[in-house]
Image (cartoon, coloured by chain):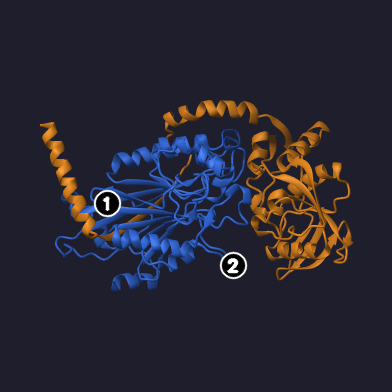
Amino acid sequence: MRIAIQFRIIVLSAVSVFLFSCSSNYKLINARRVLYPISPSLAADSTIIKTYLPYKLKMDAQMNAVIGYSAIALTKTSVGGESLLGNFFSDATLHEARKTYPDIDFAMPSTNGGLRNDLPLGAITLANVFELMPFENELIVFELNGSSVQSLMNMIAKSKGQPVSGITIKITDRKPVEVFINGKPFDPSKSYRVLTSDYIAGGGDDVNSFKNPVKSTIVGLKVRDALIQYIKEQQASGKKINSILDRRVTND
Amino acid sequence: MINRRKFIKAGVITATAAALSIDSLDALASGSVKKLTILHTNDVHSRIEPFPMDGSRNQGLGGVARRSALIKKIRSEEANVLLLDAGDIFQGTPYFNLYGGELEIKLMSDMRYDAATMGNHDFDNGLEGFYKQLPHANFPILVSNYDFSDTIMHQSTQPYKIFTKQGLKIGVFGIGIELKGLVGDKNYGATVYLDPVQKANEVAALLKNELKCDLVICLSHLGYKYSDNRMSDQILAAENEHIDLIIGGHTHTFLQQPQDVKNKAGRITTINQVGFAGINLGRLDYYFEQYRGKKLITSSPYTISNDADI
């Protein structure tokens, strides 16, 4: 009996496959849409938790270590072209890289898009830093001539600001109108030492200003490791990490 | 057709009496109307657990276990469900740094995803890094505009797949974003990027005209829209003829409701994108009326309702 039914189903589906291969048999008449927020009020599927739990335990043992504390929540919300998170990120990486290369003039270690998560107020775990900077990018110091620096300024201004340190940029109508590097006006006839990542330097996020450097030097420090190192140092000296909006980038 | 035009012109979503009476007509039960449920995510970015309760913007939101429970509930209520993802499965939490995406793909298989496309971050451990996790996937990776011929991935993806649900034929294909300038050169290697609009039109026409699909869905990682003239779902929607639905990603756009765009053929191409990190699950239910001979029984116009009680 069961075999007979199955056979009938097979025959029927064979017939329908034949029919449907001739032409569409259906007309779309209605669509209804809904968005489900995945909120804490929803039940959780315990079989899924069971699958990821061994991964989680191993990960947490490594990643939940508190490496420092923040005085404020560091968010990537842009205020006039700069952000608390962007300023922290750039200042911290520049600080760490200058230990080896003290003559770096300024830094753009990431684009805004590369800041992948905010840092919370209070305890900062290793996981927080991995979520902020999940990529395995390396810090590199580039010596750039004036026109390459100008092209970088133009890119920063066109996008109304990027995470920078050691430089102030006044932007009007998406153009850099006033640039100070290390407190001195930008001189297009000079060359400058700029800290960035291998991702940005390789043309990532459509930054093309690092294509013709005078010189480039690999720092030997991953961007994320520089951040971790900086936070740990602050902690060791009894300080919380902090950041301010100091109008290093402004838009008129 | 007039109704459809009017709808597009006014740009207003109307829930008509006819639409609401579909269920009560018992048309579903009699088989003259078929219902298809599309569930979708994009840019989940290795967010296995909900965002931690640390005062941050998204605290407590998302989580694969909750999403899975919701999907199971919907599957228990609906006969024809397709579960799809628009790419950037990888990167964003230490789960990816430690396990390379294995867990993300395993859990998608457990949730019975039907298909996914590739986002730029799925290249973050190189082609080899993605390839290595494919044995954990029991769903196909659909990409039509990346030519992987000269790479390790040459047999790992397919341009499209046709799903048959109670006689309905649903064609699903994938479109990826340009990798140059977004992904490190060595991470995508010899992958050749093909024009997305041209490829999408080619594949969608094949699915609709030759393979007679009743619905054509594009999983796109192009991004919703940009302030400059970069290729986006907006452009693809306006420049195609046969796509019914674009499930988008990349820009992490939280659309409160799907957007209906008039395409090149004067029909509707719908775009949807539901943020990122699994904060939302999108759902679109499509109702199809069966032709009996050449005639439709009710000859209803195509109607759309959002925030539907489904």
Q: How many marks?
A: 2
Where residue B306 sits: x, y (%)? 37, 57
Task: Out of A189 and A161, give the one closest to the viewer.
Answer: A189
Can residue B21 be seen here? The reply is no
Residue B113 in the figure: left or right of residue A9:
right
* Amino acid under disc 1: Lys
Quadrant hosting residue A32: bottom left
On residue B228, the disc is 2
Give the structural element (helix, strand or loop) at label 1.
strand
* Chain shown in blue: B
Q: Nearer the viewer, residue B229 or B66?
A: B229
Q: Is residue B47 visible?
A: yes
The residue pinned by badge 1 equals: B35
Q: According to the rendering, which colour does chain A have?
A: orange
Q: Residue at the location (62% across, 38% down)?
A: B54
Q: What amino acid is found at the position of numbered circle 2 in the picture?
A: Asp
Q: Secondary structure at mark 2?
A: loop
Residue B238 position in % (x across, y down): 44, 68
